[in-house]
Image (cartoon, grey):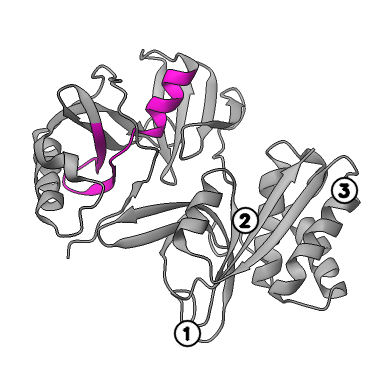
Amino acid sequence: MKKLYLGLITLMFTVSFTFPIWAAQTDRGTETVKEFVSEINSSDDNEGYESWNDVDIVYGYELFDSDLQTVLGDLYYLKNNNNNEGYVIVDTSGANVLEFSSGIPAYDTAAETLNIENSSSVKYLYVNAMPAIVNEDTYLNLNLLGEVKETVGIGSDVIPFYNPNPQSGNCIVGAISNLLWFWGGNGYSALTSNMSFKDVENKVDSLINAEGGYANKNIPNTIKKYVKNKSSSYSVSVNNKWNPSFSNVKSETNSRPCLLGFAVGSPYSKNEGHMTVCVGTRSAKSGQFCKLMDGWSSQVVEKQWGSYNDFMSKVRMSK
């Protein structure tokens, strides 16, 4: 089976919403999308894509990297009687499918909500396979539903919504620290104010060892005590769940990241477990995938979902 990099699973809409063509559509890209749609239609596993039996392929727009110059791919709409039936993203060669969905692209949902009109000052980004929009001098980081989760002025360094940090020691400590680092940069600045990532790790390491050591059961109290120590105006709920389903993780990460465990025998190790922060999910013919800040990379990475995903922790901040 040809390896596919799966698409965002977005809400199912039937809204007619089309952007004008701005980029250089390629015959190769159109043909790749046509062949891919045919492959989906002929598959026995095409649930949710039945409407693709009779669609027109309409070019959408280019997708850029965070430098705003490098083109990473092109988005094509699938339409039936002018109704959107989904989209497919191909890489710059036009030969490989990067992402597909039967829903509306996150870019379109955000643009419609914010009344963003296409112009030379608008660019659509695909940073670490996550959506973002640059509108004039503003960089808008989006979640998978097209909601704006961060606004960055272009005058400053353009940074991705998620800023993964490699762990320096234990993976549970690293994962908790990456999660707190995320919240510190997204509305809860007191969590990481005047601290380096290593400082956060050191504090988390001290707290979890005071709770009894590096174990999943000690995660809730560790996070709660860290937050309480940093600000009395913040509240946090932490709920561990063993043997979560893929839909559990998908539902949670549609709104916020969560901790996700990989047991022994996962892609990370045959001999020991590993803790990560999951920031999103994807589904494809080749399987289900999780987008991760895994403590090993400074970028969001993807790993396939499996029975080794035996643990998640829902961490919800409020004021």
Mark 1 and mark 2 lie on one chain; the one further toward the N terminus is 2
* Type of amino acid under label 3: Lys
Q: Is residue 120 above or below residue 67?
A: above
* Type of amino acid under label 1: Lys
Point out residue 301 in the picture as x, y percentages from the top left corner: 46, 57
Residue located 85% across and 68% down the image = 206
| Residue to which mark 2 is pinned | 165
Provide the secondary structure element on which disc 2 rests. Answer: loop
* Type of amino acid under label 2: Asn
| CB within 8 Å, label 2 to label 3 | no
Provide the secondary structure element on which disc 1 rests. Answer: loop
Residue sitting at the far bottom: 271
Point out residue 85 in the picture as x, y percentages from the top left corner: 23, 34
Q: Which residues are magenta?
A: 85-113
Residue located 14% across and 48% down the image = 36
- Would residue 51 be visible to someone looking at this image? yes
| Residue to which mark 3 is pinned | 230
Disc 1 vs disc 2: which is toward the camera? 1
Disc 2 vs disc 3: which is toward the camera? 3
Q: Quadrant of residue 79?
A: top left
Quadrant including the N terminus: bottom left
Which is more toward the observer, 149 or 29? 149
Q: Quadrant of residue 154?
A: top right
Q: Is residue 296 above or below residue 215?
A: above
Mark 2 and mark 3 lie on one chain; the one further toward the N terminus is 2
